[in-house]
Image (cartoon, rainbow, N blue to C red):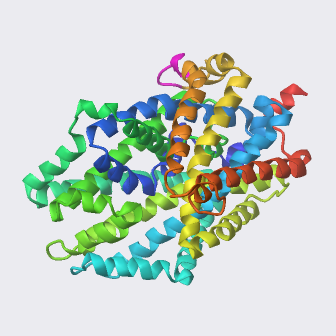
Amino acid sequence: MTESKSGFSSSLGFIFAALGMAIGCGNVWRFPRMVATYGGGPFIFAWLVGLFLWSFPLLMAEGVMAHKTRCAHAGGFRDFMGPKYAWLGMTCAIILVFLASYYSVIVGYCIKYFVNAATGAYKTYVPIDVLQAAWDDFRAHPGQVVLFHAINVIICTAVVAGGIRQSVEKVCKVAIPALFALCIALSLYLIFRFDSSKIADAYQAMFSFKASDLTNSRIWIEGFTQSAWSTGAGWGLYYSYSMSIPKNSHDGNNAFAVGAGDQVGALVCATMVIPAIFAMSGDLQAAVSAGNFGITFVYVASIFSSMPNGGLIISILFFAILAAAGITSEFAMVETVGIQFVQNFKVKSRTKATWLGGLVIFCVGVPSAIWTGFIANQDWVCGIGLLVAGLLYVIATLKHGATKVMDEYINNPVAVKLFKVGNWIKYLWYFFPVEFAIIVGWWMIQSTTWYPTAAETWNPFVSESTGTVIFELAIMFLLGYVVTKLCYKNMLKGPMTQEEE
């Protein structure tokens, strides 16, 4: 999966694919909800600071390790840190398998609601309580959820099996500009079609800035977390694509382009979702309190159905954007699981490995499709797992040598670049463990307040407890160690491995 003929044709092709990975469902529903919940401007400011202090350094650490080693995650850690650390890379890949699997179920939700919109479900007004009942009924029938989960896996696997350059890159070069164009078109439609005072109120809610809100630690934690989850920094997906970039590609410039592009995408989505709520109801807090799924599949769907002359076209476009954002993110997940078979288990056929990866994602995702409590559990555990994996990439970079990575790899004189990356990134790698301790520590402390008794808080079988995240991540680390022991001798060697022999 890493041969030159199957890699990206250019850095631009890589950036489009990586933006497809980063711009996902969370940009459409979570970011607007966080902006509305945490005061608009102060949250956006904290989120942008998080981009510079967390996401940019982490994307660079992922990208340079993959680019230099040309090995899958375990091999990358082997070559950057030493053979005894390969299992840490495998652990990162295993965390990603669980993430990819439950995320596929969520993308299946989006495909289902695109079908609803395309068949006229929101052509005429539908009350919120009716849409809530329809959403509950859909999730109560696992057969439907499994079906749309399977549809997503098949679509994504078929595209990825076609090759990085021949299929993924070409699709993303069309899909990402189209997503931006559609979002901007819907935003402009709202501006020119509806009451200007309501639209002005929406933008006021989004960008008003109350400096005193910056003393609220929750805003900073949520802003940094949103940046990490939105850009995908630490997921290992950016790593997987970086294995296939041209040799003269500049890892620093790539990371800046992808991180900034994702944030622009989130802002564009917010200018579509929040004005829509203000234009048709103005009750922003009611929408926010509905949660990620509620705001999208219940509240926004009802808003579209209440638009003058029906919201048929608008609802189709919105759910098309949502489904496409999820599908392009899933491409990278299928690629990541597939390369494990090629590089660690001697599966020589890229096509076969990709379909095996799709099969793993489907099977591991079935419990999330069947039990709503399980998908909530996976969202909580993998969310923390993402942050843990990010720390591992940075530790690997530091052990290899931050100065060496910056001077010899990122600012390589033969790399084609727009600008040279300053040493401030190197210093942020050293500071990263402190950021990690603050963010993960805060989340873990918060989780101890979610249940009324200590027994529930530390029970590993309570879906969103403190105990379950510790227990399940421990299992993932154990799996990483065991799987590495089983396949270590089969791991492909990359340029750095050969240089050491």
Instruction: Identify the image quadrant of residue 500.
Output: top right
Give x and y (percent) for residue 116: 37, 78
- Which sits in the foreground, 392 or 322? 392
Is residue 232 visible from the viewing direction of this image? no
Residue 378 drawn above or below residue 409: below
Is 470 situated left or right of 375 in this image? right
Asked if residue 222 is among those painted magenta in the image, a careful observer would answer no
Q: Residue at x 34, y 53 (%)?
A: 33
Give x and y (percent) for residue 74: 77, 43
Read off the magenta span: 417-425
Give x and y (percent) for residue 141: 52, 83
Is 123 situated left or right of 455 in this image? left
Residue 164 drawn above or below residue 115: above
Asked if residue 421 is among those painted magenta in the image, a careful observer would answer yes
Q: Residue at x 84, y 44 (%)?
A: 492
Q: Main secondary structure of the magenta part?
A: loop
Is residue 318 visible from the viewing direction of this image? yes
Is 477 situated left or right of 18 in this image? right
